[in-house]
Amino acid sequence: MDDWSNVRLCDVINLALGAVLFFSPWLFDLQAGAQWQTASIVGIVIAVLSIAALAAFAVWEEWVNLSAGLILIVSPWLLGFQDSQAMTIDVAIGMTVAALAAVEAWLCRMPQDVAARVSENRGQASDL
């Protein structure tokens, strides 16, 4: 992974999104219950994973962040608060976190895939 600046930028944005999600019950005056708990718990998970990724990067952190984003997207329908402001917040932040985690995982895999293709092509060229 050569491009640390893009990867770190994704982690910093995810950290900010996790903080906004954690504080969203107070910022947006959400009702107590499932929407409050979902925002708090998933916000902490996203923030902690982002801090861990900034400290010592590992690809599995991005996959867990991707999962957290997807869980956040479907949580309003699973937990029954689909007609509320919390749904908009959860879906918007979930989509952004999932997209950033997918991009980050892709950026990590991209150089390895390109290197493998180049070495394959060199091996085939030397056989000729």
Image: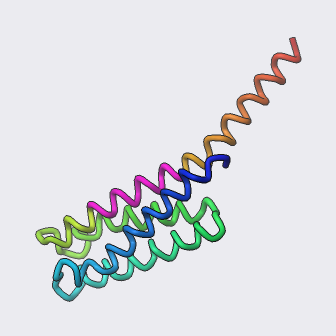
Left or right: where does residue 123 sit relative to residue 85? Answer: right
Residue 45, given in percent of the width and then of the height, sits at: 45, 76
Q: Residue furthest right?
A: 127
The image shows residue 42 at horizontal and vertical percentages of 38, 76
Residue 117 image point, x, y percent: 71, 30
State which quarter of the image contains the C terminus.
Answer: top right
Residue in the image at 44% along x and 54% along y: 100
Where 123 sits versus 60, above or below? above
From the viewer's perspective, tell me whether residue 69 is left or right of residue 105: left
Q: Which of 116 and 96 is in front in this view?
A: 96
Looking at the picture, does residue 127 appear above or below residue 54?
above
Residue 28 falls in image quadrant: bottom left
Q: Which residue is drawn at 54% across and 73% down?
A: 51
Count of labels in the image: 0
Horizontal side of residue 105 vs 83, given as left or right: right
Residue at the top extreme, as displayed: 128
Q: Residue at x 24, y 76 (%)?
A: 79
Which portion, as a residue range, is magenta? Answer: 92-104
Judge whether residue 115 is colored magenta: no
Instruction: Give the residue at the far front of this rendering.
Output: 5
